Image: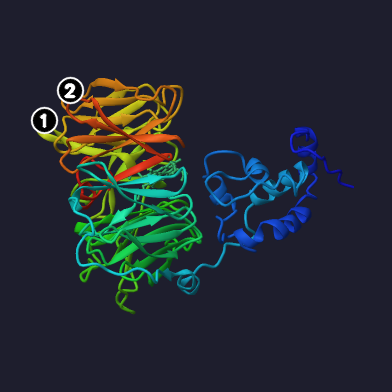
Amino acid sequence: MIRRTSSFKTISIGTLCSFLLAGTAWADAVADYKEHCASCHGEDRLGGVGPALIPETLKRMRGPRVASVIAEGRGATQMPAFSRELDALQIEELAGWLKSPLETNPVWGEAEIMASRTLDEDYASVDAPIWSSDPMNITLVVETGDHHVSVLDGDTFEVLDRFETPFAVHGGPKFSPDGRYVFIMSRDGWVQKYDIWALKQVGRVRAGVNSRNIAMSGDGKWVAIANYLPNSLTLLSTDDLSVAKVIDIKSKKGKPSRVSAVYQAPPRESFVLALKDVPEIWEVFYGDNPPQSGLGHDFRIEGQFKNPDPFPVRKITTPDYLDDFFFDQSYEYVMGASRDGKGGQVIDLVIGQKVADLDLPGMPHLGSGITWKHGDTTVMATPHLTDGTVSVIDMESWETVKRIKTEGPGFFMRSHENSPYVWADVFFGPNKDAMHVIDKNTLEIVKTLRPAPGKTVAHVEFTKDGSHALVSIWEDDGAVIVYDAQTLEEVRRLPMRKPSGKYNVWNKITFSEGTSH
Ligand code: DHE
């Protein structure tokens, strides 16, 4: 018989482990889930008012342990504390079950996606912005502390609106090419469309069960969502969030794969997909003239001839698994980081083949890479996730030009065409409160800012003209600090709830070389 302890704090780890290892725990956990959790998180654990409670989602949630959240609730959400209803053992049991995988991959096709779609009845389109700021200098701040986005005027730094997002937004929101609408994605696959001119949400749809990021087509007609669960890419109409197509991801040999990320390649009129489980890169074309066959031995377009397909797929075999990408400004070359964190490769998308190896140890975070002119060449810089280095690579020879030593592993980098500096954070380790400023010419660190000692200081975005740099104090009682980008002096401090990414309309829609795309 299972003995339940009366206090959450008194259970011993040993008792707990032997209990869980005995393998008898799930029956009670399932019953407790049905009674206490299913009404908000769904009978199938796939989410409802609350987020999905599956390992793919839970692993990515920062903050307290799952058991503590069940016992004590989660601040700034509707999640209540259950320590009165459930004892310590029940809570650990339940947390353990929630971290176990679903028995089968959920079905989430066109019908399920369309059934989830809501278009706001109180939304009315406007002919012009209802505010008088420069529409091209709007900056959005994602505040993950309480799942909101602040809409900032980039000249006055006044907050024009603060709206609620789906739970746990990840990756950069994507703007329509005219900068009017923004599409925001959560890890649970919700896509939110928001009208910046009207300061109103337009609608929401759940495009996947567990999703990675989104990309906007160059013509602004489609938004693509990369999914882990199910193994699919969802293409939505940006107009009304309806499903244009759901593409099942299966390799040339028929092996299913998760999609690590989807990127836009506007000059190629395609989306480029990084795949998690197979050594292939995919291109999904949306333009009127997708390339025909014969561009290389590895080139293949499915469906195009037998059954005309508005989104033909090209599958390129790669010598290694590549799931973090960086593109050159022409989008012909894609740099991919190898899974083992020891190097990388350059794939030429035109010929569909590897053309160079990259000397990139230390798990580079290519997705955060940026480029700038350096002498008579263009260089690309990327932080490393596992060591205190920023690598600088020549984009013609693909050689590493310099390894800049930093105070710890970093996550994000930014610059601007009008700035002489690159800003690189130290996201992990004891120096997470440091922000390095690197001279683009000398490739030396010229200043290390520490605006909030002991707190995580991360992610930078510039204003449209590059005159100011916005830096996050990545804490629940955090702030966005506005710096003069030339003098490196602090100008303003705007209180924010765990501000993560910041996204300037102009820098994003013009594909500024100083920002990730
Ligand atoms: Fe991210 C962007 C993948 C963990 C915050 N992250 C991206 C992108 C990818 C990616 C592929 C580019 C997509 C885009 O913007 O369209 N992230 C991953 C991971 O694989 C990783 C390491 C593990 C995971 O949890 O999935 C990871 N990311 C994190 C975090 O832990 C961060 C710091 C906090 C969080 O919100 O989960 C985080 N990722 C971000 C942010 C961006 C991002 C803020 C957008 C950066 C930008 O400036 O564009």
Vertical position of residue 511 compared to residue 189: above or below = above
Using the rendered view, name the quadrant where residue 442 is placed: top left
- Using residue 184 as the reference point, say whether residue 482 is left or right of it: left
Vertical position of residue 369 compared to residue 278: above or below = above
Measured Cα–Cα span from mark 2 to mark 1: 11 Å
- Using residue 437 as the reference point, say whether residue 476 is left or right of it: right
Helix, strand, or loop for circle 2?
Answer: loop
Vertical position of residue 206 compared to residue 73: above or below = below
Question: Is residue 90 among what the camera can see?
Answer: yes
- For label 2, the residue is 442
Of residues 152 and 282, the one drawn nearer to the viewer in this rendering? 152
Q: Residue at x 60, y 50 (%)?
A: 79
Q: Amino acid at mark 2?
A: Thr
Q: Amino acid at mark 1?
A: Gly
Instruction: Please state the total of marks drawn on the protein image.
Output: 2
Q: Residue at x 86, y 43 (%)?
A: 3
Helix, strand, or loop for circle 1?
Answer: loop
- Residue 142 is situated, as x and y percent measured from the top left of the image, at 38, 46
**Residue at the outermost right position:** 1
Residue 375: give its label. 1
Of residues 289 and 172, the one drawn nearer to the viewer in this rendering? 172
